[in-house]
Amino acid sequence: MAAAPSLGQKLRQLWNHPAGPKTVFFWAPTFKWGISIANIADMQRPAETISYPQQIAITATGLIWSRYSTQIIPKNYNLLAVNAFMAVTGLYQLQRKIRYDLEHSGSKQHEQPEQQAA
């Protein structure tokens, strides 16, 4: 029976992995987590301040790159995780904005003063 690899061996394997810390394939998705974290922080903001173009871009990016990360070699699970998370947070923010707009669409029509005929 083979002995389990030691912590040092596991760290060496991670370091020398084709998508390890010596490559851009590690650092690009790692820094991309900042976008997802910022999107989580935006969940505390009022729904009326959510930008459709921004959230559509975040969602589309997450979906496209999640698919891409399953097709490339070497497999990059950090890339898959960050993009799946981006897609989920983007969809959640879009849902908040759509729900807000639907709830307030009737009240905006009543707030506008009627135009008087001249």
Image (cartoon, helix red, strand yellow):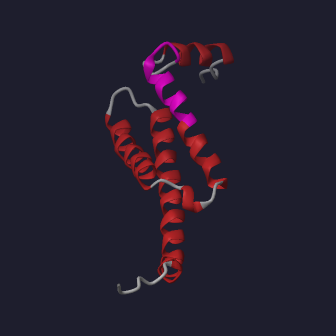
Q: Quadrant of the N terminus?
A: top right
Position in image of residue 67 (x %, y %):
35, 43
> What residue do we see at 68% from left, 18% from top?
7
Q: Nearer the viewer, residue 91 or 77?
A: 91
Q: On the rendered structure, is 35 left or right of 46? A: left
> Which residue occupies the foreground of this view, 72 or 60?
60
Q: Position of residue 61 (x, y in %)?
A: 39, 43
Q: Is residue 18 above or below residue 111?
A: above
Give, as a single range, the part of the protein colored magenta: 21-34
- Residue located farthest toward the front when viewing the structure as drawn: 118
| Placement of 32 over or under 24, stated as above or below | below
- Viewer-closest of 30 and 93: 93
Residue 81, placed above or below residue 113: above
Magenta stretch contains residue 22: yes
Residue 69 forms part of the magenta stretch: no
- Spot occupied by residue 59 in the image (x, y as percentages of width and height): 42, 50
Q: Position of residue 112 (x, y in %)?
A: 49, 78
Q: Residue at x 50, y 22 (%)?
A: 27
Image quarter in which the C terminus is found: bottom left
- Magenta segment main secondary structure: helix
Q: Residue at x 53, y 75 (%)?
A: 104
